[in-house]
Amino acid sequence: MNVKRLPASRLDEVVKLADRVFKPKDGSMGKNFPILFSKKNAHNILIVEDDGEIVSMVGMYYAYAQIFTSRIKVAFIGSVCTDEEHRGKGYATTMTYEAAQIALKNDAVLMMIHGDNDIYRNFGAVDAGTYFTIKIMPRYNSHSSAFKKAMTYDDLKKMAIWHSKEPVRFIRSFSNFKTFYDVGHAWDGQAKTFINDSAYITVVKKEDVNHCIEFAGDPNSVAMLIQSFSNEFGETMVHLNSNNKDCVSRLLSETPQRRKFHGTMRVLDKSKLLDQLKDYLDEAISGTDKGALVAKLFTFDDSDFTKIVFGSTESMPEYTSEIFPIPLPDYHGMDYI
Ligand SMILES: CC(C)(COP(=O)(O)OP(=O)(O)OC[C@H]1O[C@@H](n2cnc3c(N)ncnc32)[C@H](O)[C@@H]1OP(=O)(O)O)[C@@H](O)C(=O)NCCC(=O)NCCS
């Protein structure tokens, strides 16, 4: 089997394959995921051909997760598919391992995968990350503050500034903000952003449920926007990470419920991950014996190490540390498109 990188000139062919598998009725993967399926990113998509026709693909692109003072390089994996007539030949499996090798060579230390199946589990990917939800019901006697749908270029500029002040986030270029804005999709659903003077929220409606998948800005304003949105449009599920959960849930008087990551992930190289987390760990570990901590961490395999460092809702290895889990942003927002 010959795994190739996709030439930009053949982008249309992989979009057609992905549409056949994921959007058999209507819709377009190319439109919903314009960064993944872009000419600029084409060489990060892996393909297998049969008789010159692309029959299997693994989509990949890179992002940086800012975690307080550290920045780690992440490879997002998604749109993994094989044409129905060519399944079971090991194409997706081989490309998943190949993608990990390529990602490692490009200094990515964590693979976040949009999916959970035997292929990823055999590869060592697990449920990880500490994510929460709160459900906000309309409160008709509560005060609804004014908000509007983000519509202008100036709104985008303000959003980028507020987003850049979040301590745990994916680094997002202004051009990616614009792409998100143009496409109006996130988490493979229709996304709308609402804004007031000091904050924004982004909401995706999926199967009739409103999901607030991202917010930034003044926490009081965020809470007000979420409540006002719920008062106007109905029950809203707010997605939180372990960094932003306390403030917003207290302001909205709701207890956060832990939820799984919508996919799987795996640390690709333990040493490299700890290197990229060095600035944060040096501060957090300062009162601890770093050598002993690292030595103990290295006794775990990559899957358990991933669970320890980022937390997991699955069975955890026996290990306790005040430093872990550390927060991770969720990529089911405006970043994986
Ligand atoms: C999942 C999928 C990509 C596998 O492609 P493939 O090239 O046939 O995969 P491989 O031949 O490498 O591996 C087949 C393995 O995947 C498992 N598998 C096959 N189809 C599967 C499916 N729809 N869901 C979960 N696992 C599946 C098989 O159990 C097999 O496991 P084994 O190695 O223990 O036999 C393909 O079935 C597909 O396109 N499915 C629809 C889209 C999808 O679900 N994508 C994954 C989420 S992004």
Image (tube, rainbow, N blue to C red):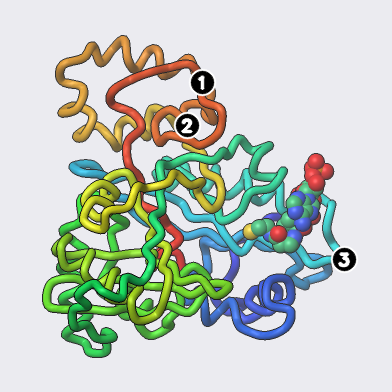
The image shows residue 238 at horizontal and vertical percentages of 38, 61
Can residue 308 be spotted in the picture?
Answer: yes
- Check disc 1 and report the residue beneath it: 317
The correct choice, above or below, for 287 with respect to 16 in the image is: above
The response on whether ligand 1 sits within 8 Å of label 2 is no
Q: What residue occupies the far bottom of the structure in this picture?
A: 152
The image shows residue 195 at horizontal and vertical percentages of 22, 78
Can residue 48 be spotted in the picture?
Answer: no
**Distance Cα–Cα, label 1 vs label 2:** 8 Å
- Check disc 2 and report the residue beneath it: 307
From the viewer's perspective, tell me whether residue 317 is left or right of residue 135: right
The residue shown at (56%, 27%) is 315
Q: Who comes first in sequence, dot 2 or dot 3?
A: 3
The correct choice, above or below, for 51 with respect to 66 in the image is: below
**Distance Cα–Cα, label 3 vs label 1:** 40 Å
Image quadrant in which you'd find residue 221:
bottom left
Q: Helix, strand, or loop for circle 1? A: loop
Q: Are marks 1 and 2 in contact (CB under 8 Å)?
A: yes
